[in-house]
Amino acid sequence: MTRRFYWTALLTVFLSGLPMVSAVAQEAETAVPASEISPADTAWMLTSSALVLMMTAPGLAMFYGGLVRKKNVLGVFMQCMFLMGLMSIVWALWGYSFAFSGTNPYFGDFDAVLLKGVLPTWDAATETSLVPAHGTIPKLLFVIYQGMFFIITPALICGAFAERMKFSTMCVFMVLWGTFVYCPVAHWVWSENGWLLAGDFAAIDFAGGTVVHITSGVSALVCALLIGKRLGFGQEPMPPHNLTYTTLGAALLWVGWFGFNAGSELMATPRAVNAFASTHLAASAGLLAWSVAEWVARGKPSVLGASSGAVAGLVCITPAAGAVDPLWGMVLGLAAGFVCYFACTTIKNKFGYDDSLDAFGVHGVGGTLGAILTGVFATKAASNGSFSGLIDGNAVQVRNQIVGVGASVLIAVIGSIVLLKILDAVMGLRVAQDDEVQGLDLSQHGEEGYIFY
Amino acid sequence: MKKVEAIIRHFKLEEVKDALTAAGIYGMTVSEVRGFGRQKGHKEQYRGAEYTVDFLPKVKLEVVVDDSDLSKILDTIIASARTGQIGDGKIFVSDLDQVIRIRTGETGADSL
C-alpha cells in the first residue's frame, strides 16, 4: 500500500512539472520535410542502432553469462535482458532529455521529456510531415541510436557485481545511475553545449570512451568494493561455466561494435569507414596482444584470453575510432591487449578486489588508455579536419583528454558511492547468504538455466 | 551373485561394453562420476585465477554376475579397459543379497 502510494506521488509530482518546462525552448528545433532526410544515412543509422542493441543481448549476456558459475547464468542473462527494457523506457521518458537537451554546459533539462520535439508534426500548408532532424537523419533515429548506448553502459557494470547483487536493488541502481551519472557525462561530451565538446577543454570522444567505458568501468570498481566479494572468493574455485558462450559473446560484441563506433559518425561518410576499419584492426591487435602475453607468461594462449583481448582492443579504440587512422588503431589495440591483460591478472590479484568478470579491468582501464591515446594519435586527415592530437602538433589535446577522463572518473566514483550507500540503507545491496549459495537463478528468478532430462 | 563396479576411462567405454557383451552379460548400468586416485589432477587458468582440478571425470559401470562368471568378467574388463598408464581406474567387487526383476517378480540368477 505505502509503496504504491510513494510511486504514485512521485509520478504525479514529476508529471505535473512537465507543462511548465516544456513551454520554454521551442525555437531551436530544426524540422524539415521528410524528403530532405538522407535515405543513405538513415539506412546506416537504422542498421547501427540494431547492431548496438545486439551488443547487450546476446553479445554481453553471453560474454558475461559464460563466465559465471552455472547457478547464476540466468541472473546475468536477466540483468542484460531486463536492462534492455528498463533503460529504453527511462530513455524515452526522461533520459534523452537529461542527456541532450538544454543550453547548460553541465546538465540537461526537461525540454525533451517524453520525446518532446523529437516526433514529426503535420504541416497542413505544405501537406507534408515536418521531421525534426539531427544532422541528416531524423532526430527520432538519433534518440533511438543513443538509447542503445544507455542500455549497454549500465549492463557493462553488471560484470563487477555478478553472482551476488539483489535484482531489485540492481534495477533501482541502474535507473538512478543512468540518470545521475550517464546522462550528465553524455551531456558534457556529446550535447551541443557540453563543456567537453567544444571550448577550452574540448576532448575527443568519438564513440563513448569516457561516456560509456570509463563511467561504467570505474563505477564497476566502486560496486565491486562496496558490495564486497562473493562468498568463498579466493577459497573455492569459481571457474567460468561455459566458455563457448563467452567466446561467441565476444564475437557478437565485435560485430555489434561496428554499429557502435562507425555508427557514431551518424552518417555514411569516409570517416565512418575510417572508424569501421580502425575498430576492426584494434580488435584484431588486442586479440593477438593478450594471446601472446599469455602464451609467453603461461605457456598457452587461452580462448578466454583471445576473447578478452579483442574486447579490450574494441574498448580502447572507441573514443578514437573516427579520429585516428587504422594503423594507429592497431597500436591502440595492441596497447590495450597488453595493459588490460596486466590489469585483469596482476593488478586484480595484488589488490584482491572481486571484480567478478573484469568490468573495471577491461572497460575502466581500456577506456582510460584509449581516451588518453586518442589525444596522442588523432589526426585531421583521419577525422576530416575535426580532431588533431599530439602527432598532429596539438599537444594540448592530451591535457584535454586527461581532464575529460578525470571529470568522468570523478562523477562516476562519487555518483556510484552515493547511490550505493543510499540503496544499501534502503534496500540492501546483496542477496541473503543462503540465496547466494543457492544461486541467483533460483533465488532471484525461480528458474534454472539448465534442465536436462 | 556379485556386483562388479568398475571405474574406467571415458574413451574405453565402448570397448569394454563390446567385450562384456561378447562375454555374455545381460545388462549394465553406466554413470558419469568424478574422483581421484593416483592420477594427479591438472591446473586450469582463467584470466588471473588458477585452479587445480583434483576430481577427474571417469565412467563408472555396474554389472551384476553369477558367482561362476565372475573371474571371466573381471578378466574381460581388465583386458579391455587397460592402457597401461596411470588413470586406468579400479574395479570393486561385492556380494549381492538379492536381485528382483520388477516386471515378473523373478529373483536371484533367473532375473539377471
Image (cartoon, coloured by chain):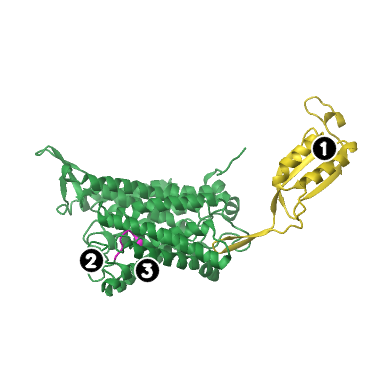
Chain colours: A green, B yellow
| Residue denoted by label 1 | B64
| Residue denoted by label 3 | A410
Other-residue count near label 2 (Cα within 10 Å), few / some / many at <14 / 14–19 / ≥20: some
Position of A442 relative to A156 (above/below): above
Image depth: mark 2 or mark 1 in front: 1
Other-residue count near label 1 (Cα within 10 Å), few / some / many at <14 / 14–19 / ≥20: many
Circle 2 marks a residue in which chain? A
Numbered label tally: 3
Residue type at mark 1: give it. Answer: Val
| Residue denoted by label 2 | A198
Mark 3 / mark 2, whichever is N-terminal: 2
Closer to the camera in the image, A407 or B64: B64
**Cα separation between marks 2 and 1:** 82 Å
Position of B106 relative to A158 (above/below): above
Region rendered in magenta: A204-209
Closer to the camera in the image, B22 or A50: B22
Mark 2 residue element: loop
Residue A210 location (% of width, % of height): 35, 63
Q: Are marks 3 and 2 in contact (CB under 8 Å)?
A: no
The image quadrant that residue A413 belongs to is bottom left
